[in-house]
Image (cartoon, grey):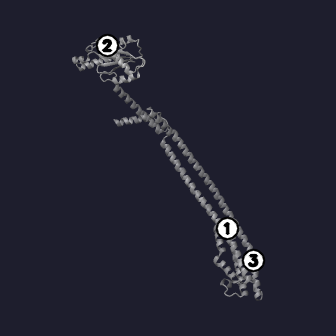
Amino acid sequence: MLMADKQQETERVRKRQGGGISIRIIGAVAIVIAIALAFHAFALASSITDANQAAKDGEKRYVECSDAVDNLQTASDYLTTQARLFITTGRQECMESYLEELTVVNRRGKAVEALKSSLSDDQRAAAELEEALEVSDELAKRELVAMRLAAEYYQVQDVPDKVASADTGSVEVGPGADGKLQAARKLVLDEDYDAAKKSISASVEASSSALLAQLDAGVAANDTLMQNLLFQLRISVALLLCTVMVIVLVLFMYVLKPLGRYVRRVDKNEPLQAEGAYELQYLAHAYNAMYEDNSKRIEQLREFAERDPLTGISNRSGYDNFLATHTRNIALILFDIDDFKGFNTAYGRDTGDAVMSKLAAALVAAFRSTDFPCRIGSDKFAVIMTNMEDDMRNAVTDKVNLVNTILADDSDDVPLITLSVGVAFSAEGMDDHDIYEAANTALNQARDKGRNSIAFYGD
């Protein structure tokens, strides 16, 4: 039964439920957007890192290629210088330095290989390098022949095999030792030699220009990529900030602000006005349903607590509560059943209860709906008449006489009883206690007169 009532209450709350943004939907959307933007930002950061590394690699390649170009030209010039020095002076260390550079250090070959790997996408520039290397190799052969002739002229002992094996058959050599020296000098000093050197320089310069153009293009492309990635990253961060601001605003408008109003209404013990997010509206309707049920129960409990179970009219608690808030322009009438103790002894408690019920019914019937009849003791009754002035004693007397008339009707087989009645009108400065004391004083005066009498306070 309780489960069914709970289900019915839940259904009633749902029927009252209106629209509203759901906090769960807000949270889900926020999480999805945050994850998407976070992944996008992470991807952009990774791409920026890669682009930055590519820029560093490009700078490194630029330095390496520049060094390679310098080494190629320097090595070629170095070989020429050492060959010419040996031919001119006959110093054997010059020949040895030449051979070490040519066969061991080999800066030319290493430089060409480095440049070829960097110019793998430029076939023309690579061909220029190959041509420069071929011309340089031809010059090296020419220089070796010249150094052999010079070594024979200077009668150098222990000539290295690479020099000694140089083929001199195609060289025109004059008579005598001087002819060999003149032939050697011609090989490294004539116009053909200088033309070959210029050819090497031109090829190296062309390859270098192609290399620089390729590297510049790579740097420009990488710079464009970096700018694009940074722009996307700024957009992503801006969107993330906007999303956070929108979520904060929505939470403030649909959650925090309504919750603040809810708290204030709960503090004031007032029902909630449904507003805000869907869940808060549901909470408000559920709270209001409980609030209504609780208010009804409290009212029922108050009514039960202030209702006399025997007579059905208000009891002493109801009397106290009513009189505490109604002390102006009233008349308090106290009724006391004459010799009710003897009546109970003579007729029994059940008949006594019937008499009190009849008296309560007579009070309700005789007085106005705006008046307040109640039982304030075992055989003591009171009526609080509202909107009364001190000069309205006749109206009070008429009401008391009407009560006595009703009680005189014995058609219900209830024995006849008489009443002592005391009346007091409220005056300026009197509180509920003062009014009661005044009415009770009048009641005692009525008792002193004897049965079935009425007295007004102040008479």
Residue annotated with mark 3: 193
* Nearer to me, 384 or 115: 384
Amino acid found under the numbered disc labelled 2: Ala
* Nearer to me, 365 or 152: 365
- Where residue 152 sits: x, y (%)? 72, 87
- Where residue 265 sits: x, y (%)? 46, 33
Q: Is residue 53 above or below residue 169?
A: above
Choose mark 3 or mark 1, whichever is in front. Answer: 1
Residue annotated with mark 2: 446
Q: Are marks 3 and 1 in contact (CB under 8 Å)?
A: no
Q: Is residue 318 above or below residue 126?
A: above
- Where residue 293 sits: x, y (%)? 39, 31
**On the picture, is 101 further left or further right than 294?**
right
The number of discs equals 3
Residue at 39% of width from left, 35% of height from top?
Answer: 8
Q: Quadrant of the C terminus?
A: top left
Q: Residues within 10 Å of mark 3 (few under 14, many from 20)?
A: some
Residue 359 visible in the current orientation: yes
Choose mark 1 or mark 2, whichever is in front. Answer: 2
Q: CA distance from mark 1 to mark 2?
A: 132 Å
Q: CA distance from mark 2 to mark 3?
A: 157 Å
Tell me which label, 1 or 2, sits earlier in the chain: 1
Residue at 75% of width from left, 77% of height from top?
Answer: 193
Amino acid found under the numbered disc labelled 1: Ser
Q: CA distance from mark 3 to mark 1?
A: 26 Å
Query: What mark, if any, has residue 66 been given in the picture?
Result: 1
Tell me which label, 2 or 3, sits earlier in the chain: 3
Tell me which label, 3 or 1, sits earlier in the chain: 1
